Image (cartoon, rainbow, N blue to C red):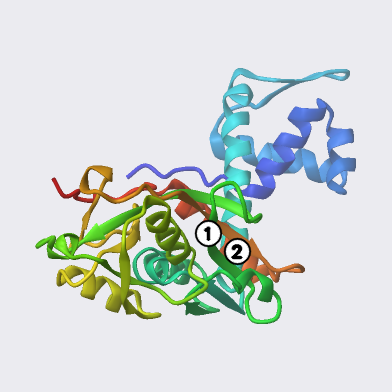
Amino acid sequence: MTSVAALDPDLLQAFLAVADLRSFTRAAARLNRTQSAVSMQVRRLEERLGTELFHRSTVHVELSASGEALIGYARRILVLGEEAVSRLREHETQGHVRLGVMDDYGTLLVPPLLASFAALYPRIQVEMQTGLTATMPERLGEAYDLVIAMHPAGQGGGILLRREQALWAVGATRSALAQEPLPVALYPQGCLFRKWATAALDAAGRPWRLAFVSHSLAAVEAVAAQGLAVTVVKSGTCPSSLRTLTQADGLPPLPAADIRLHRAKGLSHPAGLLADHLAAALAEAPAHRHVRAVS
């Protein structure tokens, strides 16, 4: 089996310095080595590769054809080596991050992202709290390092991750739609969707009654799925147990919401790593899951 020449990073570094400066003397000064040491390193690299990398004269140092071919690979090898060392050091980063997030995102979207983050940074502990996020950004630094919150479209500050459309949803039987006044299952006061839903029904002159209230996303959706009430969901997190509704079903349109990432001032390095991880993943993921509308 033919052996492959090992490309020692130190030898490549000496080669690149000479190639960039076209001088062994100036390369030695850049690397803080003696000229003879740099010359010896380049010679060792040439011996390993079995080819001449420079054409030398008393006044000029020029790359040979082999040197021209090697220079791009040499730069890439050194950059990859630096990236590998940096990634391994990051892998050992330790810390504790407090994350606040909406219930549906905390249940459906964020857990897989925390799993991939834990694989990259196993020594960083993430404490996640779910619930209504209206007041969470106000407690950044005190209770949270990061908050993923919902705001009216175009408002809220922070980093925009995606836009979600608020939609009416009902169980497969649609029985709640036939009731008067319309039964609705919503979240407690302070929820943006509750505010929008009740305001839209009032503006449309549609009689309604609050049939169920809970902090639990699963409970609200379960009540709606049983046909006991209609509810409001995000277009990107509507569960398969519910069907979305349109104006053709006699319900008024609802606004869109921005999902934004908020960071505490003076964010720690571990929290910054998680913020970047979440922002990249949520911004790249599809903004809308497939949802079934009632016909």
Give the x, y percent position of residue 138: 68, 72
The residue sitting at 74% across, 42% down in the picture is: 40
Q: Looking at the picture, does residue 287 appear above or below residue 128?
A: above
Quadrant in the picture for residue 198: bottom left
| Residue neighbourhood size for the residue with mark 2, other residues' Cα within 10 Å, grouped as few (<14), some (14–19), many (≥20) | some
Q: Looking at the picture, does residue 62 appear above or below residue 123?
A: above
**Quadrant the C terminus occupies:** top left
Q: Which residue is mark 2?
A: 273
**Quadrant the N terminus occupies:** top left
Quadrant in the picture for residue 172: bottom left
The one of 9 and 127 positioned closer to us in this rendering: 127
| Residue neighbourhood size for the residue with mark 1, other residues' Cα within 10 Å, grouped as few (<14), some (14–19), many (≥20) | some
The residue sitting at 64% across, 69% down in the picture is: 137
Give the x, y percent position of residue 250: 25, 49
- At label 1, the amino acid type is His
- Find numbered disc 1 in the image and state the secondary structure of the residue it sits on: helix
Relative placement, left or right, of 24 versus 40 is: right
Give the x, y percent position of residue 51: 58, 28
The one of 202 and 126 positioned closer to us in this rendering: 202
